[in-house]
Image (cartoon, grey):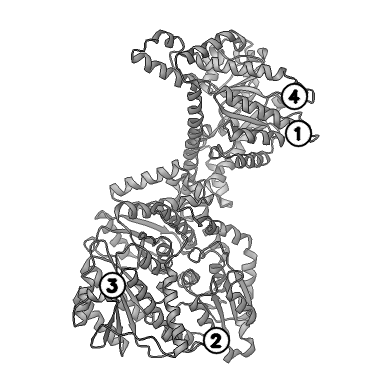
Amino acid sequence: MTAYDAGTSEAANPLKQLARLGQSPWLDFIQRSYTESGKLKKLVEEDGLKGVTSNPSIFQKAMGHGTDYDPQIRQILEHQIVDAGTLYETLAIHDIRAAAKVLHPVYEQTAKVDGYVSLEVSPYLARDTDATIAEARRLWLAVGAPNLMIKIPGTDEGAPAVQAAITAGINVNVTLLFSLNAYKKVVEAHIAGLEDRLSRGESVAGIASVASFFVSRIDVKIDKEIDDRIAAGDSDAAALKALRGKVAIANAKQAYEYWQGVVKSPRWQKLAQAGAMPQRLLWASTSTKDRTFSDVLYVDGLIGPETVNTIPPATFDDFRDHGKVAPTLTQDVAGAHRVISEARRLGLDLDGVTRTLVDEGVRGFEEAFDALLGAIAAKQAAFLGHRITTTTLNLPADLDTAVKAELETWRIQGNVRRLWDRDATLWTGHDEAGWLKWLNIVDDQLLDLTKFEEFQTEVKARGFRDALLLGMGGSSLGPEVLSVTFGKHEGFPHLYVLDSTDPQQIRDFQDRIDISRTLFIVSSKSGGTLEPNILKAYFFDQAKKVLGERAGSHFITVTDPGSHMEDVAKKDGFWKIFYGNRQIGGRYSVLSDFGMVPAAVAGLPLKRLLDSALRGEKSCAASVPPAQNPGVILGSVLGVAARSFGRDKVTLLASPAIYDMGAWLEQLLAESTGKDGRGLIPIDGETAGPASVYGKDRVFIYLRLGEKPCEKQDAAFKRLIAAGEPVVTIELHDRHQITEEFFRWEFATAVAGSIIGINAFNQPDVEASKIETKKITTAYNETGRLPPYEPFAKDSCFAFYADPKNVSALKGGTAEAILKAHFARGRAGDYVALLAYIDRDTATREWLQQVRLSVRDGLKLATAAEFGPRFQHSTGQAYKGGPNTGVFLQITCDDEINLPVPGEKYTFSIVKEAQARGDLEVLGERGRRALRVHIHGDLKSGLEKLAQAIRAAV
């Protein structure tokens, strides 16, 4: 017969006889099916069971296996978006309440002495007093049962939390007590908490507490040391052998003796007279681990008045079957003292053992909790199915092993929790904590959803045909992804995004829109960035020509509070001002107002997008262990591949319907990690080729849209996987899941930054090009002309520029020779970046793609294909501050048209030229291999000739 099946009502039942000697048997076990089947109630009725304890290990066994909890998990996930920790807690509270209901009659019959069910605070908080106090109060209120006990670890940090909880009137089970000294601190905390209440005129009656003193684990440690010494031929072998299986009970008897003295003290008597109940000793860890001993040794040997023994199910059955009931706790106490003295004489370090056991106990509960949360997270992902994205890793064996080791390191060190706790030491220990508001921005946006929905309704009511966003980098790339991915929605304006100073591109956008029916979105975090300011100036001037004094009513801005752009918006009478958050950097801002305001303007389903983002957030939550945490998994692959294997070229390819995701990812990865000579180099949109064209510096990311995949891409990635290339496939089951991936990639980038060892939230090298650009535009404003700038070579329609060091390496009189010398400087592990300061249209994008593939296939090097100046606010950080592995070809041209910048002498052409010059100069200063080729005359024919020269050169 087992405790799972039935008890017995026989009068001879040893479990029932314990009550005669003042001891209460509790069960160290909880499981839903056990409670729901009536088995727990049967133990109460037939075995005199008086309480239940739980811990992470118990819940891990109950929830992590089988299907008991599946119906409730499915029901919760159908109506809520939660993380694994919240899911666990919901399940646990359900179980605790159900068990508490079964035991409530005992609670009443014993006048609140017994009938308790224990629920432990998160084991992750064992060393954090304040967090433990907060958790104890929260769980107490959440369960809402008077016969609940909150379990708090008896660590040095836990003792003050015990006092605070008692002071708050919370029933407390103090766990993980092994030593007399630790127990004394807990006794003091209990008494002090009651005295706090008494001093405030509050009742001390009915507040229950037990101190869980762990027993058998002590003998396991001590007896192993004894056995090792005997095996080694210790001269005290006989004396050592005589102590086997005796130290733990002796230690417990000393604790009980101390308790007897406490309850007789005047200090306690004063509390007792006020109605306080004593904190009883509870014997825990009472299953026998050594089979040479009695299987009920730690129940038989610890029976005494006003104590509790929480017994595991198997031991519960064993004691019912053959337990012996006698007042053993108060017998031969002198002998217990002799055992402890003898142990000290023989050099058995009881104090050291108990300290080790506390650390092991904390760590053991943490590991059990990790396993529990991991199992729940895995079930959650399985039940959600296509409601979340799916990730598949195909990694070479060495990289796979290293990634798994990194995930285990993150688990052991609690790094996911450290990240959510804003622990700057996870990166460089500087200002990182001040840049992490993006972690919770989705929650904030959902709370503020009405604001966006009302604005969306207003936009629709005004009947705008077009919307033009003016911005750069983080302010424009996220909205661009939304615009390209979702297109135009009925009844709402078509959202365009302009992030260039190229005058032809500006004119192209101007020609697409009807200014009289256009809403302009000026998007600038700092409000001081050159491009959004001059674009605003230009289009505001154009709007005034069409709309007159009503121009401002066609403009809104998204900017940080107190920025220059806020002042401009107020001065010019903008329709609305939306605010960013100063604790969110631009590249992490897509889920803030910088992304949500354009989404609202475009008529996108805001709740659906935010819910998807929330799923991303919850899947990366602090409660989700690294091995089940998609953000940590992805970040570990990227970080470990770059740090340990030189695979720092993150090659991004997405299904055609979501292709623009790569442009946003480029900035996130490059600007976050490319600094201090380290980092990830994103390679976006480079058409997949055969494995033979790749070096050993790649990690491939395939963003696959399940609802509309590309067969050619699928086939290409199958070949890469078969060739042993590292491939991460992320499947989006519908395109609205891009917001889930927004959050996951932000989280993964923060993780990768930690692994690489950089500050993932600053951008120390972006400013350098801005400074050089400003010098040139200022000089133009002052003199009316650009500073002298002479090419070092000319050939046909081409003029070549570089700094002196680069010029010395680029000998040759023809375009082909110069380009050949330049590209020849590339070595295995390098990359080639084509930086085109030209109109970004379909034709030029196709041209750039064909040229990059020629370079890749010819040189077997990774290639980046970028348009200037927009890349300066994106990958430019990595090009200047990341690893010095880039070979840069800057491409500029004569502008067929020019446009004025209102209020300035310089024009957009001048600005673009200044940006190109400034960036090339900084690349040269940083020792980068950089060359500029300028195309004079007709751009189309010039690009054709340049393509021919490049193909010949590689």
- Decide which of tag 1 and tag 3 comes sooner along the chain: 1
Q: CA distance from mark 1 to mark 4?
A: 21 Å
Under tag 3, what secondary structure? Answer: helix
Q: Secondary structure at mark 4?
A: loop
Residue 919 left/right relative to 446:
left
Which residue lies under the disc numbered 3? 852
Q: Is residue 906 visible?
A: no
Q: Amino acid at mark 2?
A: Ile
Query: Which residue lies at the image location 44% right of the left edge and 87% below the top edge?
Result: 780
Q: Which residue type carries mark 1? A: Arg
Q: Which mark is residue 111?
A: 4
Q: How far across and how far down the image is residue 119, in percent?
A: 60, 34
Residue 6: quadrant of the picture: top right
Task: Name the residue type under label 3.
Answer: Arg
Location of mark 1 (residue): 197
Quarter of image, res 5:
top right
Residue at (56%, 56%) from the top-left corner? 440
What percent of the width, then of the height, locates residue 860?
23, 65
The residue carrying mark 2 is 515
**Circle 1 crowding by C-alpha within 10 Å: few under 14, some 14–19, many from 20:** some
Spatial CA span between label 2 and label 4: 79 Å
Q: Nearer the viewer, residue 765 or 255?
A: 765
Disc 1 or 4, which lies upstream in sequence? Answer: 4
